[in-house]
Image (tube, grey):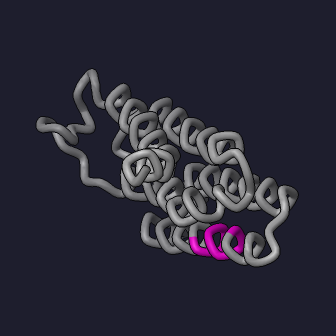
Amino acid sequence: MEHAAPSSPPRSARLWISLGIFAIGTFMSAILTRQPIREAAVTLACLIGAVSVFGVAMLMAPVTPYPRWAHWAAGAVLAGWILVSPLVAGDPHTWRADIRPVLWFMPWYVLTFATMPARLNGACATESRRAGWMMVAVSVVMGGVLMFAGRVAQLLRA
């Protein structure tokens, strides 16, 4: 009896590989934007962050309980937030102080939602008609909150 070799890694291997991509992307972005900070380093860190979001999304797409279109759309929204983060910050020092500390969340969000168990009802229902739209909406809102939290804190301190 012949056994066919699996064409893709099992779920646990996908999880560990995704965690590795997540960790490498996060650490590389942090290392690149140490003292002295330059715009080119911020741009490169953002590109690495966006690639890590898509790397995690690519590995976890086959096992996510959410609709695939929503999984990819949420990954694109979060990668987009990373790519526009230098514009939101305005300058490299503000980016490092306000945005760099929260960049880890973007690939983590994709990883977390991809590993949730399938649910039929509730706020995190994965099988409802609105599940995909909720996932995308949450990525828009959470990404925006993380991008603008530092600005809001500065306004409240003033």
On the image, which quarter does residue 142 sit in?
Answer: top left
Give the image quarter of residue 157.
bottom left
As drawn, the residue found furthest toward the top would be 129
Q: Is residue 96 left or right of residue 126?
A: right
Pick the front one: 146 or 117: 146
Where residue 64 appears, as percent x and y from the top left, is 40, 47
**Residue at image point 38% right, 57% down:** 112
Residue located farthest toward the left when viewing the structure as drawn: 122
Which region of the structure is painted magenta? 23-29
Residue 97 magenta-highlighted: no
Q: Is residue 83 left or right of residue 121?
A: right
Residue 44 in view:
yes
Is any part of residue 5 visible from this angle? no
Q: Nearer the viewer, residue 3 or 103?
A: 103
- Total residue callouts: 0
User: What main secondary structure does the magenta stretch of the protein show?
Assistant: helix
Residue 110 position in % (x across, y down): 47, 51
Q: Where is residue 87 in the image (x, y as percent from the top left)?
A: 70, 40
Where is residue 46? Give x, y as percent.
72, 54
Using the rendered view, name the quadrant where residue 45 is placed.
Answer: bottom right
Q: What residue occupies the far front of the structure in this picture?
A: 158
From the viewer's perspective, is 145 left or right of 103? Answer: left
Image position of 109 with respect to 104: above or below: above
Q: Which of 123 and 61 is in front in this view?
A: 123
Q: Which of 75 and 60 is in front in this view?
A: 75
Residue occupying the point 57% across, 57% down: 99
Residue at x 30% of width, y 54% of height: 116
What residue is rendered at 12% in x and 36% in y? 121
